[in-house]
Image (tube, grey):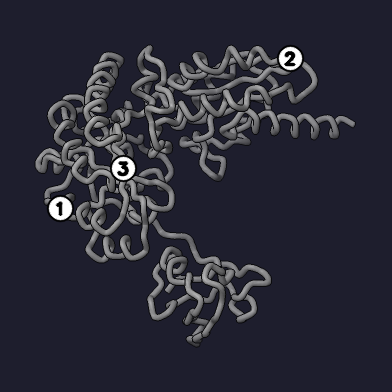
Amino acid sequence: MISIIQIQPDSIAEELGLEAGDAVVSVNGKEISDALDYKFYITNEEVELVVQQGEERLIYEIEKEYDDDLGIQLEDLELRSCGNACIFCFVFQNPKGMRKSLYFKDEDYRFSFLYGHYTTLTNATREDLERIVEQRLSPLYISVHVTEPELRKLMLGIKFDDHLFEKIDYLTSNGIELNCQIVLCPELNDGAHLDQTIADLKAYFPMIQSIAIVPVGLTRHRKNLFALKPVTHEYSLSTIAETDRRRKALKAELGSSFVYLSDEFYIRTDLPIPESDYYEGFYQLENGVGLTRDFIDNFQAEYPLLKNPAGRPLNISLVTGTLGAEVLKKYFLRQLNQLPGMFFKLHPVLNRFYGPSITVSGLLVGEDIYDTLKDQKTGEYIVLPPDCINDDGVFLDDWTLPQLEKQLGKKLIVFPRSFQKLFALVEEYEAAFSDHRR
């Protein structure tokens, strides 16, 4: 049973007299435990809907088009927590005193399907697997890391056999596609272990569509944790070379390169970002695999359409992590500064909060951004990276966007993932400012 939080106007649910606060019990005899259950079972032309209204349980017989929605919005899914203790888990590397939600480890196949979150499936039950198959929750995103049993236990922080291959067998043989992730830890799950992991997963191709290899991230707050080595410039170069060798053999065997390195490996070196054909299906963009190439290609396509949105000389500051600064300097800054009347300046922010080895823009905090910019000459608009605040406009250190804006005395814009969209926002702000002055 799950609560209704809103009824859409002029909907079937409104005609039935349903209200927020009622609860959906079942659809066509199937008990509803969350919004995914509801969405799956409601796609029928004939629906028996059981609703709890106060002390009364009501049954509605509904005839509708197959894909018609009833107009019911249910309460949000509640994340399931992770019981693993992965030796590289970022949650364990957070400092003390942060908001409670940042210490929550999620392990939820439903969010893997909906949002591309990664799950290990270590605690997935037979009932969970059957539901995945019945409701066609495909593709899923699976953190594998390593397949050798004892090393797997060490890396996931578990003491039991989680029957990984039995679960993969069941899911793939029933038509569920998987995309897998390996967090690469130098001198731990690389080398021969990595070769074995790839070979084991390759056996499930094409139902396992891809393997993404991402570098381990280590913060300065690792206290009393398993000793891990950082990914260096030299290690990145060797990983790229070894992965190119593996990909060439896989391409010849499978017709697919199957294994893809995250962008960070390339940005750490002087090597160029691979072209689009490297990523084939761009299976794991949200994991930072091909995201930079996709951004570059989209920029090149929109660049001829870009023009000064202010009609006057305009200075814009681009805030980024140290890793993102390398990309912007190499692929974007020169062209942006060729636009008439436009002047762009980069402001790389060293991550003091997590430590300088954390270089991605999504983990920048408000205080570090402020400390970097407070004594620098910035443009009329300061553009922040898109992932450094949450949906409520709050940074990881609990600084807020309005707070940072007030401290800097400049208009802040969270980058909307496109320069064309950024220019449109600037044009809106310019128009609003002009109207205000009049």
At mark 1, the secondary structure is loop
Name the amino acid type tagged 2. Gly
Q: Nearer the viewer, mark 1 or mark 3?
A: 3
Label 3, secondary structure: give it.
strand
Please provide percent x and percent y for residue 74: 51, 66
Quarter of the view holding residue 137: bottom left
Residue 240 coordinates in the image, percent (x, y): 28, 20
The answer to whether residue 135 is above or below residue 255 is: below
Q: Position of residue 65 (x, y in %)?
A: 56, 73
Q: For the residue labelled by badge 2, is the local secondary structure a helix, a strand or a loop?
A: loop
Of the numbered discs 1 and 3, the one sitting upstream in the chain is: 1
Q: Residue furthest left?
A: 150
- Does the rendering let one see residue 221? no
Label 1 vs label 3: CA separation?
20 Å
Instruction: Look at mark 2 in the image and give the residue it sits on.
Output: 341
Real-space Cα distance between discs 2 and 1? 61 Å
Residue farthest along the right direction in this orientation = 438
In the image, what residue occupies the spot 27% across and 31% down? 251
Residue at the spot of label 3: 209
Identify the mark nearer the N-term, 2 or 3.
3
**Mark 2–mark 3 distance (CA, rounded to whole Å):** 46 Å
Q: Is residue 280 left or right of residue 87?
A: right
Visible residue check, residue 339: yes
**Residue at x-position 51% and y-position 24%:** 296
Give the residue type at disc 1.
Answer: His
The C terminus is located in which quarter? top right
Label 2 with label 1: CB-CB less than 8 Å: no
Q: Which residue is mark 1?
A: 163
